[in-house]
Amino acid sequence: MISQHFKSMAATALIVVTAFTILGTTAWGDIVNVIQKSEEQTIGVPIDRAVVIESAIPFAELSIANPAIADFSTLSDRTVYILGKLAGTTTLTLIDKKGNLISNVQIKVTTDLNELRKRLKEILPDEEIKVRSANDGIVLHGKVSSAEASNKAVLLANRYAPNLVSNLIDIESLTSKALITQTYTIETNHKFFRDLYTGTEKSAVKILSPADAQFSSLLLKLKSFKTKTKSYTLRPSKQIEFFVGGSVSYPHRDGDTILIKNFKNGADFSISGEMIENSDGAIRMNIGVIEQSVSQDEAIISNITNVFETQLTSLRHTVDMQNGSSLILIVAPNALNLTPYRGEQAQKRIQFFNRKNTNHERQIYAVHITLSDMN
């Protein structure tokens, strides 16, 4: 009975792991032997580090499921050298001389997060940055004082897990900022419209700052119109998105059926902000614009198909703002068509399908944006 029990124990593979790590300034750490009476054992290996495993039973053949994650080299018929290459999990299979399975060893290659934490503390000692793993990647979270510090942390983390870094870091100086938008729909005469868009023939969107000559007069004019006010919270690594404009109803042929569709005529805005270093709290506003306008060819109204087409134009503006300062975003659908008579004729075609717009003045949309602290 005892002899049979002894043979059963001898048949069980014993995995011995010899691990080497760098601790502080020492060359190599102590040798750690882990003995498991199990046919499956998970061995952790940092990227670009190595472990040596030893089997109690001599093996004749080895195979690894994914050589891109870890590589191996046989040192003897009992010991194997394993090198971690990429983050992930793979399996090392040990086979004896008779073709029987000795053991499946799970090799888990991970990023050396302890070393990354140490490097972040050295480079950004005054920042509160935390590091954790997520599948094969790295997640950064916590709080920093500026966008530059956040970018440095991401750049460093990418050296440990290229293109697998998620940035959830908050920038403290931006968490208390509010972006207040007041949207106006106004009618302007032809002269005011042309003066407003002088020199901006390539865009239907214009951004006015207090330094522009038309800013004060337009702001005064806006006070006589009704407004829709909305407040947004300006946070790091997140965009504020909103649409400014209206819609045009137009016919569309679908086989033998004519359908009336609504077309967005205006601009989609996306705004993000970042602190400017050494600027007493100034914010750099990155304003992305996607213009959506109606393009009309010379086809007559009876030719329903392709009378109206969609034109999309992408632009990007960068504006620096101090706390309490403001901007005016102006959107004039079809502003590019300033040719006399031709523009009026195009507008009449729109009015044929959209009876709401029956006057001869141009309709524009203005958004007054103010940056302030959260209450």
Image (cartoon, rainbow, N blue to C red):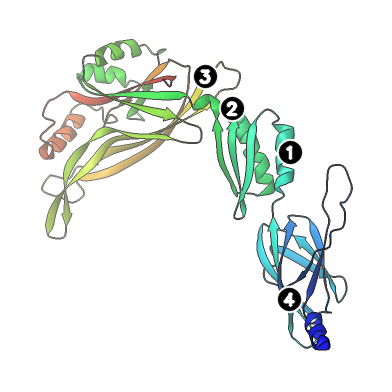
User: Looking at the image, do the residues carrying marks 3 and 2 touch, with CB atoms under 8 Å apart?
Assistant: no
For marks 3 and 1, the one nearer the N-term is 1
Quadrant of the drawing holding the C terminus = top left
Q: Where residue 119 is drawn, which disc sits there?
A: 1
Q: Is residue 117 visible?
A: yes
Q: Quadrant of residue 358?
A: top left
Residue type for callout 1:
Arg
In this rendering, is residue 141 above or below 337? below
Q: Nearer the viewer, residue 356 or 48?
A: 48
Q: Secondary structure at mark 1?
A: helix
Classify residue 179 as left or right of residue 58: left
Dot 2 alpha-carbon crowd within 10 angstroms: few under 14, some 14 to 19, many 20 or more: some
Dot 3 alpha-carbon crowd within 10 angstroms: few under 14, some 14 to 19, many 20 or more: some
Q: Is residue 200 visible?
A: no
- Between tags 4 and 1, which lies in front? 4
Classify residue 263 as left or right of residue 81: left
x, y (%) of residue 111?
69, 51
* Residue drawn at point x = 34 percent, y = 41 percent: 312
Exactly how many numbered labels are in the figure?
4
**Residue matched to label 4:** 103
Residue type for callout 3:
Ala
**Residue matched to label 2:** 146
Q: Quadrant of residue 79?
A: bottom right
x, y (%) of residue 214?
33, 13
Q: Where residue 282 is drawn, which disc sits there?
A: 3
